[in-house]
Each structure stands twice: as C-alpha cells, then as structure tokens.
Amino acid sequence: MRVDPKNRLGRAAYLLGLLLVGLASGFLTCCTARLYTKPPYTTDSGGFSTFGLTGSPLAGVIFGLVLSVYFQVYKSLRTIKRVLGLVGASILADFTAGYAGYAVGLSRFSVLNLKVIGVSDMYATALIVGGFVGAAILFLALWFLLAANQSWSFFSLKLIIYSLTGSFLAVLGWALAPSLGAVLWHTLNFFHLDESTAKEAQESNYAAFYSLYAVWQSGMAVLLGGLLPTRREAACSPEDGSPLMFLRLRP
C-alpha cells in the first residue's frame, strides 16, 4: 500500500501512524534503561547509571529500525540501500547529538537558563544543541535518500525549520519529566523494567530521558514522513535510490 497525497484522509492516517510508531519507538528505547543501570540508581548514593548520564546507546538503532519497518510497509523506502541508510543515519544522529550536546553542555557556552520550564542551564544548552544536530543529520539523510528534486532555497529553509524543531522537541521532552516521564516510569515499573523509586527516577534523570525519547522520536517520525516522496515523485525516482540522482535540483 502506498499513500496517495491527494487523499487527505489517507495522508492523515499515514502521519498518525508515524506518530504512534514514534511513540512505540520511544517506549522501546525506554525499556532498554535497565540494561545500563543497577541499584541504588543514583550516582550520589554510589550507584551506576550510564542511562541517567547519556541515555540509551540503542536509541538510534531502535528508532531507525522501527521507522524502516513502517516506511517499508508503505513502500516508501523500496530498496535495501535506503533501509540501511536510514538505520545508519539514525545511529549517527543519536551518537553525534548525544556527544555534541554533552560536550557543549559542560563547556563555557552553557549560558542558557531555562529554569522557568524546569530545565537547568546546562541541560538546556545540551538539549538545544543535541536536538538540533540530531534532527539535522536525519533531515540530510532522508533528503538525499528519498526527497524529490527541490530547489536549494527550499532545501535550506526546510533544514533550518526541521533542525530548530528538533531543538524545541528535545527541550520540551525533557521539561515533561514530571508528567509524561512519570507516567512512563510508572508503566515500566509496573512491568518490572525499571525498579527505581519515583524519587530516584527524577533525581537520576530517568524520567527526563523517558519523556525526551517519547516526545522527540514521535515528533521526528511525523516530520520525517513529510520528507518522503509523493506517489508521483516516487514513480519518477531511480530504483537504486542513488543519492547522486537527487542532486539534480531545479534552479
């Protein structure tokens, strides 16, 4: 089945599906927290938690694979090269965004104070930079793998909007730790996938990472759907999915 962009109801269902797929990917990523933690869960009490510091190393893998399956169902990827390209781009985006945000957050550039929405200055800077970098990498990958011919001005505008949205979603996701993060923690705790206490989940940043993954991955999934070729454009694109073919842009 391929979504016809002329069918608004079909397009809406397609994007709604992407939203749900992004939420599912975010939840699966949260489920990996247990692999990188052990009691007493907080570093202040001598615990070990790489998840509370840098999140899940499997986030990019899970997000890329889940999206690939959904896109393949809708015949959006069409070739194994594009599937591998999307998964690889997702892994690269997660790795680069995490370390870029972490490095900048600890540097002298950490000057943004967003405590008004519950995000400290160090985390705010890291989230803005990490969200921007991760979204930019995913955008560039999907553009050259899947997007139809567009003008460079349109490309630049979309890259800026997409990347800034990535920053916004990252900050928003982290700020929702007391609400959405708490709901996800209770869910994981019920299934014994997170055995920390509610206080530990907040102090160790588990809840913040939970809500971050749910918000950022679901938002990015919907935005990525807007980059996919329409039915007419896909029919005119090369079967081998060569990125070089998409460099033939209109002046």
Image (cartoon, helix red, strand yellow):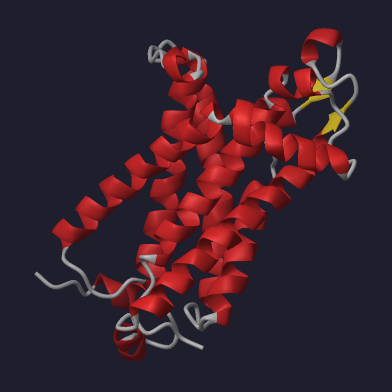
Query: From where the camera sits, is residue 199 visible?
Result: yes
**Tag count:** 0
Query: From where the camera sits, is residue 242 visible?
Result: no
- Decide which of 106, 192 is in the foreground and name it: 192
- Decide which of 134, 29 is in the foreground and name it: 29
Q: Position of residue 22 (x, y in %)?
A: 57, 56
- Decide which of 214, 94 is in the foreground and name it: 214
Residue at horizontal 53 percent and vertical 52 percent from the top = 218
Residue 169 shown left or right of residue 208 in the figure? left
Q: Position of residue 20 (x, y in %)?
A: 58, 60
Residue at horizontal 16 percent and vertical 66 percent from the top = 151
Is 247 above or below relative to 127? below
Is 10 above or below relative to 202? below
Q: Quadrant of the C terminus?
A: bottom left
Q: Quadrant of residue 237?
A: bottom left
Q: Quadrant of residue 248?
A: bottom left
Residue at horizontal 33 percent and vertical 80 percent from the top = 5
Q: Position of residue 234 (x, y in %)?
A: 36, 84
- Decide which of 162, 27 is in the foreground and name it: 27
Residue at horizontal 72 percent and vertical 52 percent from the top = 28
Q: Position of residue 226 (x, y in %)?
A: 36, 65
Residue 95 shown left or right of residue 147 in the figure? right
Is 18 above or below relative to 177? below
